[in-house]
Amino acid sequence: MRYKIVGMVLFTGISCVAYAQDKFTLSGTITIKTNTETIIGASIFIPEVKVSTVTNAYGFYSITLPKGAYTIVVSYVGFESIEDSIPLTGNIRKNFSMVEKGKTLDEVVVKYNKAANNIRKPEMSVNKLSIATIKKMPAVMGEVDVLKAILQLPGVSTGQEGATGFNVRGGSVDGNLVLLDEAVVYNTSHLFGFFSVFNSDVIKDLKLYKGGIPANFGGRTSSVLDIYQKEGNNKEYHATGGIGAVSSRLLVEGPIVKDKSSFVVAGRSSYAHLFMKLAGNDNSISFYDLNAKLNYKINENNRIYLSGYFGKDNMEFSNFFTNNYGNSFINLRWNHHFSDKLFSNGSIIYSKYDYGLKIKYVGIDWASDIHNYNLKYDLSHHISSQLVLNYGINSIYYQFNPGTIKPMDAKSPINPDQIERKYAWENAVYVSAEQKLTKRVSLNYGLRYSHFQRLGEQHVNNYANNQAVVFNRDLQIYEEGKPISTTHYGKNKKIVDFGNLEPRLAVSYAINDDQSIKASYNRMSQYIHLISNTASVSPLDIWAPSDQFLKPEILDQVALGYFRNFRNGKYSLETEAFYKKISNKADYIDGAELIAHKAIEQVLLNGEGRAYGLEVMLRKNTGKLTGWLSYTLSRAEQRTPGRDASEPGINNGQWYRANYDKTHHLSLTGAYQLTKKWSFGGIFTYQTGKAATYPIGKYAYQDITIANYGERNVNSLPAYHHLDLSATYTPKPDSKKRWKGEWVFSIYNVYNRGNAASIMYEQNRETGLSEAKRISIFGIVPSVTYNFRF
């Protein structure tokens, strides 16, 4: 009965749409005139009937209207608007090519959408940033960065100085689904988080979903970061790049067959480690990455793409440890137009993330990785100007390597070993609708069903009372359980499975063209988890699938927001309140050791999580000075109670701060175009210090002083804040020559704030007194970069 009710609710709007016999469809693709790059999110507006739509992720639009003569207005930020008159007497395929605006001091440089369309669209908890907007932000180390941009948005923060990844609305790093050309990226950072893996030269568009997540996305409980790469210029050959103090980059693009196919290849590499070696420093840190994409237009209805990425980080710290990790993927994609109303995209994707760690004083060489093979097929059905359906399927096969263990050399006491590999299969089917009920009310609703299976071949431990963690009542501590037997599952045999219905709903009520109230609800399921409990700048990365001990996380989130545009879109205000709860939130027992652990369930306890807060964002969208002020007031907590009345759980079963809890987060981002030659940017960030656990005493054991720690996460690191500034000088902004260059001068952490990555407690060898040491990663970092294009 429940499934019938959900189905009836989901399709009620569809059955209410009547079709007149004299309605026709106008459809086509919006591109950039100079290179035919498709434009995501371009607005198509029909003033006679006040109907609008936007292009999808592949530049396609479709709008159905009664027979008649209409004015078509096409607009997109940073481009000249197009106005055309079209007599609609039948279905018409009409493509538009847009021309970039010339640089003026009053140009619009930060604007997500046409004001009224943004207000009325049933989309909330979503931030869209064009690459033009990102490139106006301060360039740290001479290079603008995608992750630095989204960290200035409300509800988004980083764990600490030197941490990798980002946290959204009190969620963990592994709760973010990060997609680059639809492929999963498992680690988003280079060089201690100083750079991201996203080369801004090759990025075309990005969208961050913090809530109200559409049904086509799944598998994570915090957010979705959806990024698309450029397709390449199919008219002319061009190169773009930059030469900096720390790294350099180069992008080359051009036609393979003019007006039919093109390519783009971009590479980056750092070389700071070379200077460190020359200076006699035994430490070494470096990264490199490569982006590539090909596309071929078979005909007006069919187009294929082949894109890929490969990146690697390498870190070596003298006689302590060596660390390397990297992402890679390849994606073969096919776009097909079945008709003027039905558009499809099919993808075959392979992704990989590998992580290696060598600890020299232990003598261990340890490596882990995750592979996934992804098949997805999505359809977009433009039923009418009031209703658009999206539906599709997704199937992912996972291979997990928890650890391959080797001795570093002949003197190492470590024996070679291979922790059993794990396998899983995740499938999903979804349908969603975007519908305009009335002039004021718009909906986006959908349903996703996900199914996850753990598969053999594997030996699974069995424990007494099915408890992999046991409570020692004498010592009042949790300890690893001892298996009483094992069960062998053959290849592809089902070990355990889970299935979840994930409803989604977002509604927008437009008070007028400048104000709206929006609300959303979404349920998400997460079946794979990042096992990491270290605060080190070289994090321990082991991905593990859900099983009978490590349950899938289930998220329920609600949000309510008020949105307003002022002075014809010159200013805008976004405010949102949110509440989210997560079931099956895992945490670790005290003293958990993760490296080379063969049974990770023996150090995990299941609990729950919650987060709630208020986000405010005020933006100035036009003029010489643009930017935004964002502020977040929030709380992220966990609770891990005992399994019965005799067990204390963690912190006596009470709510405690999550590792990534940040009460206050303030960010001020600005860009100022002084002249055509000079522009300036600045970012100031302030965050409450992350949760920490400090010792409350000490005791001596065999002449060794040992710290005694109190309850988990009741303390905080010092507040995190810094100011970044940049200046860009373009010597010849009006030059007609093919070669165009600019100089970027930047200072990271202008006032040299020593932000704490962690606090280390130790005994002073001379005085015998205990002392705390703040560990900081970055101080002030000036840089200069020369960027060019030809």
Image (cartoon, helix red, strand yellow):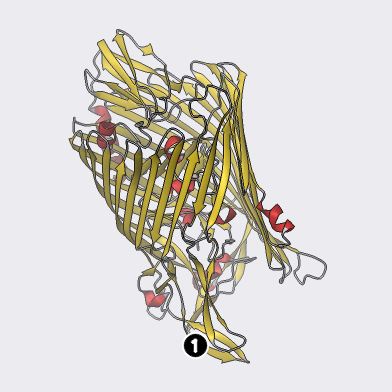
Q: Is residue 490 above or below residue 205?
A: below
Front residue of 590 and 446: 590
Question: Residue at point 28% right, 23% down?
Answer: 385
Front residue of 724 and 635: 724
Q: Position of residue 184 (x, y in %)?
A: 53, 44
Question: Residue at point 34% right, 16% down?
Answer: 26
- The local secondary structure at tag 1 comes to loop
Q: Is residue 698 above or below residue 58?
A: below
Q: Position of residue 44 (x, y in %)?
A: 33, 23
Question: Residue at point 27% right, 29% down?
Answer: 14
Identify the image quadrant of residue 766: bottom right
> How many tags in the picture?
1
Residue 772 appears anywhere in the view: yes
Identify the image quadrant of residue 789: top right
Viewport quadrant of the N terminus: top left
Name the residue at the left extreme.
511
Viewport quadrant of the C terminus: top right
Q: Position of residue 611 (x, y in %)?
A: 34, 60
Q: Which residue is mark 1?
A: 474
The 10 Å Cα crowd at callout 1, few under 14, some 14 to 19, many 20 or more, is few
Front residue of 670 and 467: 670
Amino acid bearing label 1: Asp
